[in-house]
Image (tube, grey):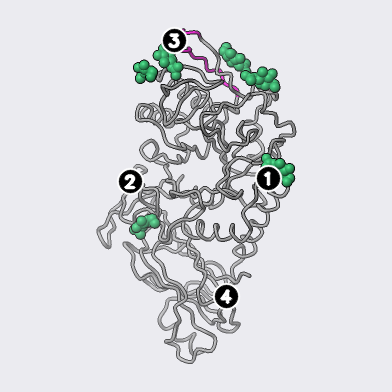
Amino acid sequence: MRKVSFLLFLLFVLKNDGRLIRYQRQRQHSPLPSGKYRISPTTGVRIALPTPEQLQWQSQELGVLIHFNIATYINNDGCIDQIVPNISLFNPYLLNTDNWVQTMLDFGAKYAVLVAKHACGFLMAPSNVKFPLNPTGKIISYNYTVDYSPVKGLNILDEFIKSCENKQIRTGFYYTVVTNNWLNVESGFVQNRTLKPGQLNITQKTYDNIVLQQLRELWTNYGTLDEIWFDGGYTTTLKDPITALLAELQPQAIAFNGYGISPNSVRWIGTEMGVAPDPNWSTGITNDGGDPNSPIFCPAECDTTLQAHDRWFWGVNVTLRSLSELIQVYHETVGRNCLLMLDLTPDRTGLIPSAYARRYKQLGDFIRSCYGTPVLPMERLISDDSLQYIQLFVSSPVTVDRSVIQEDQTDGQVIRAYVVDVQLVDTTNIHQWMKVAQGTSIGNKKIDIWQVGPQLINAVRLTIIKTVDKPVIKSFTVHLCN
Ligand SMILES: *[C@@H]1O[C@H](CO)[C@@H](O)[C@H](O)[C@H]1NC(C)=O
Ligand SMILES: *[C@@H]1O[C@H](CO)[C@@H](O)[C@H](O)[C@H]1NC(C)=O
Ligand SMILES: *[C@@H]1O[C@H](CO)[C@@H](O)[C@H](O)[C@H]1NC(C)=O
Ligand SMILES: *[C@@H]1O[C@H](CO)[C@@H](O)[C@H](O)[C@H]1NC(C)=O
Ligand SMILES: *[C@@H]1O[C@H](CO)[C@@H](O)[C@H](O)[C@H]1NC(C)=O
Ligand SMILES: CC(=O)N[C@H]1CO[C@H](CO)[C@@H](O)[C@@H]1O
């Protein structure tokens, strides 16, 4: 009991009823336009401010990127080498988007982005776009679409959106602007090389018009989109028109690779392995761990595969990554302030193979059982200056092996360094704390699995040791996981 009174002497008690700390600062919603920064009143440094959309997006933590397209029907992961698969191959005769959504729920995904068009050029939606061939000028329809395939009439994008909306999963589309094998386009440009079977000859201007018209169709016909993927970006010629189209049709959408075209941009972490660097900041625009001093809020997304060897489309006889590897991926992405966007691959029937569905559920079950319910303290204490958070378990000590910290980033990410230490149950000296974790970036979430292993403790303490403004901790919890 002496330990408790010592702590109470030092600290200001906020809540002792076992509920979360209520430390909601009264904040006026930022009058600044989005994509801006503020000047810290305490240190004078620039602090990048998120848009409400970016904050909401970051809090989702888990999503899926659905690779399903004509490349599902060939043994080449994404039509590498200018391949144009025969349209009659596309035949998902059992397609059921509710089946996809069940897997998303089992995993815990809050959002789903569907590949509407990948490198092959095949569009999974009907399209009214027409364009002239080079050099004849003959006008043809963009007919490399689902409407000219064996499942003509099936509106996969509509079904996907409806199934997701039924379960409150947010939605978006992926449309590669820079590659289109059918139209002989690579790196954003129509190539001058001998056409391969199935390829057409068009001009660059025709191609740019096709992209803008199809983006308009995708961004008009399927309601409000939450995330739009610009894989590989866009050419400088298309930058301004795409910016204008986004502002006109889907201004709220998060734009992956979208710095410069949308205030709601997020960045790629730089690898497809499912590992974020530590530290990983919510700010900065480079494809790595970011930059705490950047005045641009642009958090990172970590996309990676369930199938082994970086395989994105469903493949014959492909092995899946093990559960333990995927758990590590979770810790090295979500646990390092990155969103984990796991690939989801319906097979050639249009369903998620059952072995795949089981692996997603195993990962979801792990996340729910490990992190779903924290070990609740008897008391939570917070220092006046918000630099220390303590949880007390004194009358019933607990064994825990990890801590999870979340920073409230409404006014920007401000914490620059922290330490977590514990008071062991057999501690005799009340000043004696043992360090179990330390780090720099927190952001949306930082998970620290303690190197020292499980510990039987009376108290755990988070100390913010460096910050550029008064910190606001959204949550600080401890857990015990197998
Ligand atoms: C595509 O496949 C269909 C059905 O097998 C075939 O009839 C057609 O000739 C093929 N088209 C091309 C261009 O190879
Ligand atoms: C698409 O249009 C071109 C040009 O008219 C034609 O050669 C091709 O057969 C059409 N493809 C399909 C699948 O209808
Ligand atoms: C395309 O390649 C051909 C053959 O190499 C060449 O004669 C022609 O000048 C090239 N056209 C352009 C626009 O580069
Ligand atoms: C496309 O047509 C133009 C005009 O005839 C020609 O110069 C060019 O070489 C053709 N491109 C390809 C890849 O065949
Ligand atoms: C897949 O595995 C089966 C059984 O081992 C084998 O017969 C088949 O050839 C494999 N297919 C491919 C594309 O690797
Ligand atoms: C500020 C900082 O720590 N930046 C690091 C972010 O991550 C990249 C990639 O690992 C590092 O190169 C940076 O130094």
Task: Classify the position of ligand 3 by quadrant: top left, top right, bottom left or bottom right.
Answer: top left
CB under 8 Å between callouts 4 and 3? no
Region of the chain picked out in magenta, as a range = 126-138
Tell whether circle 4 marks a residue whose Cβ is less than 8 angstroms from ligand 6.
no
| 349 relative position to 413: left or right | right
Prevailing secondary structure of the magenta residues:
loop
CA–CA distance in space, label 4 to label 2:
40 Å
Single out the mark in the foreground, 4 or 2. Answer: 4
Q: Which of the pair 179/372 is nearer the observer? A: 179
Query: Where residue 36 sits: x, y (%)?
Result: 33, 46
Crowdedness near tag 2: few (<14), some (14–19) or many (≥20) residues, C-alpha within 10 Å: some
Tell whether circle 3 marks a residue whose Cβ is less than 8 angstroms from ligand 4.
yes
Q: Earlier in the sequence, mark 1 or mark 4?
A: 1
Helix, strand or loop at mark 1: loop
CA–CA distance in space, label 4 to label 3:
71 Å
Indicate which disc residue 135 carries.
3
Q: Which of the pair 310/170 is nearer the observer? A: 310
Single out the mark in the foreground, 4 or 3. Answer: 3
Residue drawn at point x = 55 percent, y = 80 percent: 455
Single out the mark in the foreground, 3 or 2. Answer: 3
CA–CA distance in space, label 1 to label 4:
40 Å
Give amino acid for label 1.
Asn
Residue on which the image places disc 1: 317
Residue 137 is inside the magenta segment? yes
Crowdedness near tag 3: few (<14), some (14–19) or many (≥20) residues, C-alpha within 10 Å: few
Q: Earlier in the sequence, mark 4 or mark 3?
A: 3
Tell whether circle 1 marks a residue whose Cβ is less than 8 angstroms from ligand 5.
yes
User: From this viewpoint, which residue is outermost toward the left?
Assistant: 44
Give amino acid for label 2.
Lys
Residue on which the image places disc 2: 36
Indicate which disc residue 400 carries.
4
